[in-house]
Image (cartoon, grey):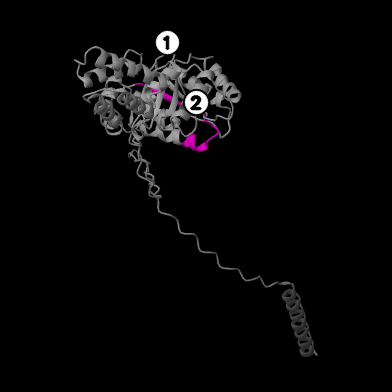
């Protein structure tokens, strides 16, 4: 009886232990797997210099780009001086005008100066555009000296003296290109299109630059874009400022700005190229009159040059009359004189307007404009 009791107790204890084990096992949780730690980022080595060490500033790398060449400065031309121009004046005139002188000398050297000879002398002078009145005066003087006074004088010397008197050696041919009271001289250049007016402005600027004068050009012939561009080119060649406006701009406003720049920069001379339209005298008078009035608000006009084409003969004289009635012309520029055998126009236009020929154009070259010299002209006529 005792043994069975012990056995029962042992089974009961074993059962209780089994139940307790199952309960405890159910309350436990399996922990989730732990991910391995990420590897640490490599640490940059400390390259800083020790304390107290001088450190040079970093040098920036140059930025390499396309090589841009600077434009070369324009090479300015050096215009010819007056002396060399006068040499060429004699050469060119001798080549184109000597026929007149040779013809007159041949007639005057005849053994007998009869009426037929004097008529031939008159015809020769008229053909050369000397003009009726000057021709009659010259023939009368030659008749007196070569026939009435006994014919003792040498024909060539007599002809030279009388031609020189006819051309007017005492006329003041100086260009009035200087102003007063610190203001520039102002030259107004007028004439019809095609006479060489704009070219004359450019060539005149070269004469003044050769004399070490500072010059400003005014491109007031605004109705011809070609004239404005042409004048700009002339200015660039010798380093002269050109004041210009858009095509069709009021010419008076361009002339005003040109003179204003001349005053502001203390230039010696301002040359203004004007429009050469000749539709009618009233329109021309209004336009040129306005240009002159506007200019003189800043500085007086010191010279008005009328440009005439020597090859146009009587047409040139008609133009001269119109312009002289519109503006107070103070001097004449005869262009293309080397291309005409009618050098007598010098005498006729001076008589017509009562003002001297001051400049003559002798070719297409940049420096083929020269001061007119009466002695050189007459010597060229005589060869």
Q: Which of 91/315 is in front?
A: 315
Q: Which of pointers 1 and 2 indicates the residue nearer the eye?
A: 2
Q: Name the residue under label 2.
A: 318
**How many badges with numbers are in the image?**
2
- Residue 370: x and y in percent read 32, 26
- On whether residue 221 falls in the magenta region, the answer is yes
Mark 1 or 2 closer to N-term? 1
Secondary structure under the numbered disc 1 in the rendered image: loop
Q: Which of 102/28 is in front?
A: 102
In which image quadrant can residue 148 be found?
top left
Between the residue at mark 1 and the residue at mark 2, the CA separation in whole angstroms equals 34 Å
What's drawn in magenta, residue-wise? Answer: 213-229
The vertical placement of 203 against 141, above or below, is: below
Secondary structure under the numbered disc 2 in the rendered image: helix
Q: Mark 1 points at which residue?
A: 180
* Quadrant of image for the N terminus: bottom right
- Residue 332: x and y in percent read 41, 22
- Residue 323: x and y in percent read 51, 22
- Mark 1 and 2 residues: CB-CB less than 8 Å, in contact? no
For disc 1, the neighbor class at 10 Å (few under 14, some 14 to 19, many from 20) is few
């Amino acid at each position: 009886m005792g043994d069975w009791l012990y056995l029962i107790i042992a089974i009961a204890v074993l059962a209780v232990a089994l139940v307790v084990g199952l309960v405890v096992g159910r309350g436990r949780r399996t922990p989730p797997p732990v991910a391995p730690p990420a590897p640490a980022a490599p640490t940059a080595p400390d390259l800083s210099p020790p304390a107290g060490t001088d450190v040079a500033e970093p040098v920036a790398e140059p930025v390499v780009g396309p090589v841009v060449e600077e434009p070369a400065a324009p090479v300015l031309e050096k215009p010819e001086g007056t002396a060399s121009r006068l040499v060429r004046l004699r050469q060119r005139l001798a080549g184109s005008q000597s026929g007149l002188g040779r013809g007159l000398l041949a007639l005057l050297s005849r053994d007998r100066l009869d009426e037929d000879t004097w008529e031939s002398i008159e015809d020769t002078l008229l053909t050369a555009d000397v003009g009726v009145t000057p021709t009659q005066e010259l023939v009368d003087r030659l008749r007196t000296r070569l026939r009435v006074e006994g014919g003792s004088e040498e024909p060539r010397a007599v002809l030279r003296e009388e031609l020189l008197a006819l051309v007017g050696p005492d006329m003041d041919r100086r260009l009035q290109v200087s102003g007063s009271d610190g203001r520039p001289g102002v030259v107004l250049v007028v004439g019809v299109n095609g006479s060489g007016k704009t070219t004359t402005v450019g060539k005149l600027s070269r004469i003044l630059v050769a004399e070490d004068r500072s010059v400003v050009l005014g491109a007031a012939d605004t109705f011809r874009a070609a004239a404005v561009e042409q004048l700009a080119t002339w200015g660039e060649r010798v380093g002269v400022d050109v004041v210009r406006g858009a095509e069709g701009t009021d010419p008076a406003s361009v002339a005003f700005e040109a003179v204003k720049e001349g005053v502001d920069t203390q230039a010696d001379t301002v040359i203004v190229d004007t429009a050469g339209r000749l539709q009618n005298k009233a329109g021309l008078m209004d336009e040129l009159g306005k240009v002159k009035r506007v200019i003189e608000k800043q500085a007086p006009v010191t010279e008005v040059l009328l440009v005439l084409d020597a090859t146009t003969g009587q047409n040139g004289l008609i133009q001269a009359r119109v312009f002289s009635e519109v503006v107070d012309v103070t001097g004449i520029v005869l262009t293309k004189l080397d291309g005409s055998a009618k050098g007598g126009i010098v005498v006729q236009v001076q008589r017509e307007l009562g003002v001297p020929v001051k400049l003559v154009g002798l070719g297409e070259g940049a420096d083929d404009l020269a001061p007119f010299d009466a002695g050189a002209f007459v010597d060229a006529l005589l060869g």
